[in-house]
Image (cartoon, rainbow, N blue to C red):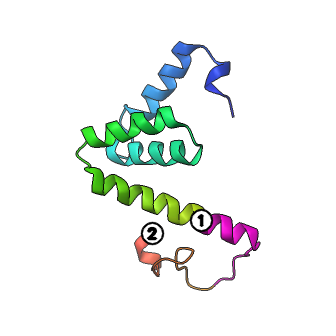
Amino acid sequence: MTSFMMIPEEEAAGKVKAIMHEGGKLDSLTRDIIALTVSVMNGYDYCSSVYTAALRNLGLDDEAILEVMSVVDLFSGLNKFNSGLQVEPDGKPWYGCGGHKLNVVDIH
């Protein structure tokens, strides 16, 4: 994967614009929630602040942003826990690594 630091600023800006602002199947709110999640997981305060502000501009209040961060915290912890235990897939119905049961119909 190419780091933005290794490519010209114009190219990096074009990539961000193409992914974050030019159509696609995901709406702006979903893309910004993903961007905030990745920024928080990478520990990058600047982008975390930028995307928190973007989510507020899209209508999320503090309670909704806290809910996003709660999901990030939950699955970060569960992923680390399961990774530490070296949990293998077992073919049982999926419960979201400790969450709700997901029906096959729900993922289509």
How crowded pointer 1 is (Cα within 10 Å; few <14, some 14-19, many 20+) is rated as few
Q: Is residue 5 left or right of residue 64?
A: right
Image quarter of the C terminus: bottom left
Please tell me which of labels 1 and 2 falls first in the chain: 1
Residue 25 position, x and y percent, is 38, 46
Q: In this rendering, is residue 46 above or below 61?
A: above
Q: Secondary structure beneath disc 1? A: helix
Magenta span contains residue 84: yes
Q: Nearer the viewer, residue 102 or 51?
A: 51
Image label count: 2
Q: In this rendering, is residue 49 above or below 38?
A: above
* Range shown magenta: 78-91
Q: Residue at x 41, y 44 (%)?
A: 31
Q: Secondary structure beneath disc 2? A: helix
Report the mark closest to the observer, 1 or 2: 1
Magenta span contains residue 80: yes
Mark 2 residue type: Ile
Mark 1 residue type: Gly
Location of residue 97 (image quadrant) = bottom right
Residue 64 position, x and y percent, is 30, 56
Q: Is residue 75 left or right of residue 33?
A: right
Residue 10 position, x and y percent, is 52, 13
Q: In this rendering, is residue 31 above or below 87?
A: above
Q: Nearer the viewer, residue 93 or 61?
A: 61
User: Residue 107's mark?
Assistant: 2
> What residue is pinned by disc 1?
77
Label 1, label 2: how far apart the Cα atoms are? 23 Å
Residue 43 position, x and y percent, is 58, 42
